Amino acid sequence: MQNRTDAAQAEADADLLARYAAGDAAAARLLSARLTPRLYAHAVRVLGDTAEAEDVTQEAMLRLWRIAPDWRRGEAQVSTWAYRVVANLCTDRLRRRPATPLEAVAEPSDPAPGPEALLQAQARDAALQQALNTLPARQRQAVVLRHIDGLGNVEIAQVLQIGIEAVESLTARGKRALKAALAGRRDELGYEDD
């Protein structure tokens, strides 16, 4: 059933892109509303920076609009293509960053106080992001695409332009590294041992 839903979603995305290429501005708004939040969330997780993630997402959508008239239906899914563009843009930005030791980066503070549950969730998100930032870029992208964005191995392989076995290896190594990085913080993050 999930595959049928995914196929219907992919077909709907392709229809919207074709309508945009034919001059339908409403189709562009609909496709943007469907793709932008997912692409942005992926970029935030990979880059760890909301401003850079906004730039990457905007650039990916601009590229999609530019290629819309030449889109060849059936060669790739619109969402997979867009994820690949975001992944490549994130990789480019990560390569340009100066190498800064993790210890030299100041821990961000949260200026808005809130209920305890919100603070706990924010601490967990921050710990996960900090741990993700320690992974090599390809591992980070594979883990984020699989376990946060919910893509399957076949889609991840297309986005990262690697084989399925390489995806499985990257995600397995990334999960092990994340588990090791977060193991000593269970109590601090509010996880109780069962």
Image (spheres, grey):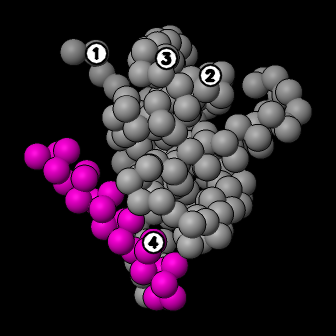
In this figure, which residue is indicated by the disc labeled 3?
166
Query: Disc 4 versus disc 1: distance between alpha carbons?
Result: 49 Å
Residue 193, numbered label: 1
Q: Is residue 84 visible?
A: yes
Residue 15, compared with residue 183, is above or below; it is below
Q: Which residue is drawn at 37% across and 65% down?
A: 13
Residue 98 % position (x, y):
88, 33
> Which numbered disc, 1 or 2, marks the residue that appears first in the sequence?
2
Tell me the amino acid under the disc marked 3: Ala
> Which numbered disc, 2 or 4, marks the residue that appears first in the sequence?
4
Residue 17, numbered label: 4
> Which numbered disc, 4 or 1, marks the residue that appears first in the sequence?
4
Query: Disc 3 versus disc 4: distance between alpha carbons?
Result: 31 Å
Q: Residue at x 19, y 44 (%)?
A: 3
Instruction: Report the magenta residues as a range.
Output: 1-24
> Is label 2 in a helix, a strand or a loop?
loop
Residue 191 % position (x, y):
34, 26
Tell me the amino acid under the disc marked 2: Leu
Residue 135, numbered label: 2
> Which numbered disc, 3 or 2, marks the residue that appears first in the sequence?
2
